[in-house]
Image (tube, rainbow, N blue to C red):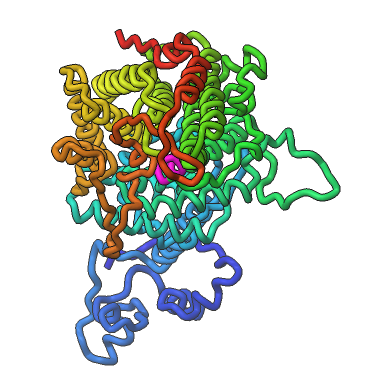
Amino acid sequence: MRAGRRRRRSPPPPGLSAYLETTQFGGAMADSENGVDDKGPACINCRRRKRKCSRGSPCQRCADLSVPCIYEENSIKSSAGHDLDRRMDQLENRIINRLERLEAEVFDDGYGRKRRRVTPESSRDDFLPPPDILKQAVEVYFDQVHPWIPILHMPTFRAAISFAPSIVLHAIVAVTVKFLDLDLDEQAYYYSECRKLVLLSCMDRFSIESLQASIILAFETIGCGTGPRSWSIVSSITRIADQLGLGCEEEDVEDKPFNRISFLPPSTSSAEQEGRRRIFWAGFLMDRFCSVATGWNTSMSSSDIRRRLPMEGANYAQNDNRKSRYFNISETEIGSANDDDAMGGYSYLIEATECLSRVVTFLLHETHTVVNVDDLKVWINKVLKLNSMLVEWKASLPQKWKSLRPTERGLDENLALAHVTHDTSVLLLHHNLAYPPPELVLLGKWKQSEQICLSTAIEIATITNQFLSRVSIVVSPQFSFCAFIAGRTLLTNQLQGNTSRQVDSNFALIVGCLREMAHRWMAKGKEKNNLAAKFADRLEAAKNSQTLSVGVFFEDEDSYSGNLSLSSPPVADMISTQPSTTTTMGKTGSMAPVTEDLTDELGNIKDLFNINELDYIFSWNYDFE
């Protein structure tokens, strides 16, 4: 028999005495103190029967049973002390793992403040893919989606993915899973579960993180063409942004005897302040786009906004402390030159979208009130004011932002979208002058406006095609909407008698661009009927039927159907092919002949427009070389 060396044991830690006494090895320790020899391992029979062994030769129990007492040489079994060490190591590892999970629930948001994770239950992390796929999803997000909704601080988020808010990660997975190398069933599972979790958590949580997740999810839902599902999310975003007080700068909040309740603590750094600013403007853009596409009123009033525009993206990534000017397209000259230097394409997209929203609001709420010449004068004066707004805004752009020439960082996606958004404002403002609907038939057709619409639509087609040829990411839903409006204008011009090859080729170019946008949006998923695809289908259907009255109906998963889809926006439906006549509408709505005095008066009204000023609107400088 090979005798083992006695192991020196320290007294057990407090609190473990009772535990040790209830275990086999604790009992062995007690027996050794009572005179039982604990040198070497127990015999095979005692170990098999789990009995105490006197370790004699033979041991007492084997002698009583008259069985051979055999000891195993070179036993690899641990002694009682070794097993206790092993148990203590296991306990220590469990405590360490638990501490790591607790630390993961408190993450550094990159602004010097510790935040509690917003995941309601740790088990919900099971909906996230494995770490390697999750990291790939984050990279795809920053490559494909982030340029359009730059609300995350990229360096901080990438450096600490494991400590990022769980709800934001779920939103990222939901919008990027179609780009990952997963089978369709896995894509459907992750998309469905992550989307549900984000929606439920955003209803339950009132935080910056829930807003970030909602914005990411809304971008995906709008692009998929599921109108009502996206409108409810956007409405929630705008409401929560207002309740969190994101509509004004922290420095402008006055210390009054009575103030609104504040849910957010003050920002601890300029980067955190800029992050909140970008979250607000992302919600603002979605609110304006949904208003333009549906004809509904906006949820955010421009008069209540006291926010600076976001700084240029590269400055934000580098934690630059510069500030841009305040949002006010009526006074674009306010602020210093340094304020303008801090602005980038995202800021100008915000202003261009606000211009588009004002034009659409005017067309929806003012055009139907024109019933006589006096009303027409008022209507044209408002058109003049909007026209001046568009001209002055473009003239105020810094020289470096007036062209689409790529920089060392590539082509600015938001600057390109700002260009086509501005052109779309021009199209919609002049469309009723170029192709007057029945309620404006006394206006007659304005040749200069018709030329402006045609040139602007062709310019949108050119910019869109050049953009798609140089940028490989998915395209914002607003981009496809602008292309759709340009296609409608070209088709209207064609149905009015312009059958030139130039119109036909540019119409086909726009449809092709929309098909490419739809293909990029689908990625590796199975959903083909997204927003861009619906726009392309409608344009082709209208061309084939030689009418613009083709309706595309939205069908939801709950079998709800109606013409409230983004693919059938009221603004686009206002485009009419009614022929011009020489009659006017009386106050009672009856048609009356045009007199010679009325013709002269209308001619004087037309002279109010400066032809050179109108031509200047659509002369964008888009140098892609």
Magenta segment, which residues?
288-294
Residue 601 horizontal/vertical position (percent): 51, 22
Residue under the point 60% across and 37% down: 302
Residue 87 visible in the current orientation: yes
Residue 519 horizontal/vertical position (percent): 20, 37
Q: Nearer the viewer, residue 240 or 603?
A: 603
Residue 97 horizontal/vertical position (percent): 45, 56
Where, quadrant-wise, is the C terminus in this rendering?
top left
* Magenta highlight on residue 292: yes
**Among all residues in the image, which is located at the extreme right?**
257
Residue 315 visible in the current orientation: no
* Magenta highlight on residue 525: no
Where, quadrant-wise, is the N terminus in this rendering?
bottom left
Which image quarter: residue 326?
top right
Residue under the point 18% across and 27% down: 508
Residue 205 horizontal/vertical position (percent): 54, 57
Main secondary structure found in the magenta portion = helix
Which image quarter: residue 45?
bottom left
Q: Nearer the viewer, residue 39 or 620?
A: 620
Side of 192 relative to 16 (left or right): left
